[in-house]
C-alpha cells in the first residue's frame, strides 16, 4: 500500500477529512489513497511533468494544487481509458476509482481550506462506468446443509468454532470483516440479536435465529477463558479466537471456509467466504419470502440496487412457472 508520506499535502488533507468527517473505515481510506495516488501519477505523466518511465516510481509528493486546477473531465476520462488499455481494468475497478475521484474533487471544491480550494469541479459530471450485471454464485440449499453438517464433525478439534462461523455466514449474510470484528458484548443473548460494524463504520442489528444462538452457545462452552491475549486487536473481547488465543484473522477464516468446502465436496475455486453471503441472501429470498427492503437492511446495503441482484430466479423456478400455467394441462 502506498505510504501517506509520499503524498502531497492536499491529498493527505482529504484523507484526514474522510476519516474524521465522513467517518470512513480505515480500509476505505486506504482505497482512496491508492486510487488517488494512481490518478495523480497518471496526471503527471499525462501533463508531461515527469521523465520517469516506470509508472510505479513516479513521485507525486511535489504536486501542487495549481496542477489540480488544470484537470478537466477529459483528463479524468483519459485516466479511466489508460486503466483499461494498460492494465485491462474491469468495469468494477474503474467504477471504484471514478467514485474516489468524484469524492476527492467534491472535497476540494466545497470543503477544503482556502489554500487547497478549487473553483471548478471537473468530476461534477463524471459518470460511473457501466457495470456488467452478473448473477451471484451461491450454494444450493442441499449444499448449504451439507457444508453445515461437515463443519460440525467432531474429528475437527475446533468444530464448535468452525460450525458457529459457517452458521453465522449462511444464516445472517455477514461480511468477512463483520464476522472477525464481533465482540462478546455485541451479542444480546436475551433478545437474540447481534450488533455488527459494516462498511463505512455503520452499525446495524442482526437478529439471530435458533440455529445461530445454539451454534454460538455451543462454541462459548469451549471458547478459551484463560490465557487469551490482551492486545491492540482486543482479543480478550473477541467472540472468535484463533488457536493462538487471539482474535481470529481474515485469512484464518478464509482457510476454515476453504477447508470445510473441500470436505463437503464443493469447489473451492467456485465458492468462497463472500459466496456464503450470497448464499444466505439468495436462500432467504427464495425460501423465506423475505421482502427486498428487509433484505437490504439485513445485508447493510446502502443502495437497493445492490440488493436487487438476489431477486433473480433460477431455471427450475422458470420451469415451474410455465408448468403452473392453467393452460398447461389442456389437450
Image (tube, rainbow, N blue to C red):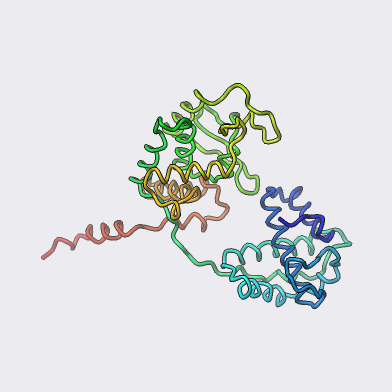
Q: Position of residue 2 (x, y in %)?
A: 74, 57
Q: Position of residue 149 (x, y in %)?
A: 37, 37
Q: Residue furthest right?
A: 115
273 with respect to 72 (left or right): left
Position of residue 38 relative to residue 275, above or below, is below
Residue at x 18%, y 62% (from the top left corner):
328
Residue placed most toward the observer, 238 or 325: 238
Q: Residue 96 at x, y = what percent?
A: 63, 62
Residue 220, compared with residue 322, is above or below; it is above
Number of numbered discs present?
Answer: 0
Which quadrant of the rendered structure holds the N terminus? bottom right
Residue located 68% across and 28% down the image? 230
As drawn, which residue projects farthest toward the top? Answer: 226
Which residue does the image show at 44% across and 60% down from the upper left? 135
Left-right relation of 59 to 98: right
Q: Residue furthest left?
A: 331
The image quadrant that residue 154 belongs to is: top left
State which quarter of the image contains the C terminus: bottom left
Nearest the viewer among 181 and 284 is: 181
- Report x, y in % for residue 46: 75, 76
Amino acid at each position: 500500500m502506498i505510504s501517506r508520506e509520499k503524498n502531497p499535502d492536499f491529498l493527505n488533507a482529504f484523507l484526514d477529512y474522510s476519516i474524521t468527517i465522513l467517518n470512513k473505515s480505515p480500509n476505505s481510506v486506504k482505497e482512496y489513497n491508492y486510487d488517488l495516488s494512481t490518478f495523480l501519477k497518471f496526471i503527471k505523466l499525462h501533463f508531461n511533468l515527469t521523465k520517469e518511465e516506470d509508472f510505479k516510481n513516479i513521485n507525486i509528493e511535489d504536486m501542487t494544487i495549481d496542477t489540480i486546477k488544470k484537470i478537466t473531465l477529459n483528463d479524468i476520462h483519459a485516466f479511466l481509458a489508460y486503466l483499461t488499455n494498460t492494465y485491462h481494468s474491469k468495469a468494477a475497478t474503474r467504477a471504484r476509482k471514478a467514485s474516489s475521484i468524484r469524492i476527492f474533487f467534491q472535497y476540494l471544491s466545497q470543503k477544503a481550506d482556502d489554500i487547497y480550494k478549487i473553483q471548478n469541479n471537473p468530476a461534477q459530471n463524471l459518470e460511473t462506468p457501466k457495470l456488467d450485471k452478473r448473477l451471484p454464485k451461491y450454494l444450493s440449499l442441499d449444499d448449504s446443509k451439507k457444508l453445515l453438517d461437515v463443519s460440525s464433525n467432531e474429528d475437527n478439534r475446533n468444530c464448535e468454532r468452525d460450525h458457529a462461523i459457517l452458521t453465522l455466514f449462511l444464516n445472517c449474510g455477514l461480511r468477512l470483516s463483520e464476522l472477525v470484528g464481533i465482540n462478546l458484548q455485541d451479542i444480546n443473548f436475551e433478545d437474540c440479536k447481534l450488533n455488527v460494524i459494516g462498511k463505512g463504520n455503520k452499525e446495524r442489528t442482526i437478529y439471530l435465529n435458533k440455529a445461530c444462538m445454539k451454534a454460538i452457545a455451543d462454541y462459548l462452552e469451549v471458547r478459551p477463558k484463560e490465557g487469551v491475549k490482551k492486545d491492540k486487536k482486543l482479543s480478550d473481547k473477541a467472540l472468535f479466537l484463533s488457536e493462538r488465543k487471539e482474535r481470529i484473522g481474515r485469512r484464518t477464516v478464509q482457510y476454515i471456509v476453504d477447508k470445510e468446502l473441500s470436505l463437503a465436496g464443493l469447489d473451492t475455486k467456485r465458492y468462497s467466504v463472500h459466496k456464503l453471503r450470497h448464499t444466505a441472501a439468495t436462500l432467504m429470498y427464495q425460501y423465506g419470502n423475505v421482502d427486498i427492503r428487509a433484505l437490504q437492511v439485513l445485508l447493510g446495503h446502502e443502495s437497493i440496487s445492490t440488493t436487487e441482484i438476489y431477486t433473480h430466479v433460477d431455471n427450475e423456478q422458470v420451469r415451474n412457472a410455465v408448468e403452473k400455467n392453467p393452460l398447461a394441462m389442456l389437450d
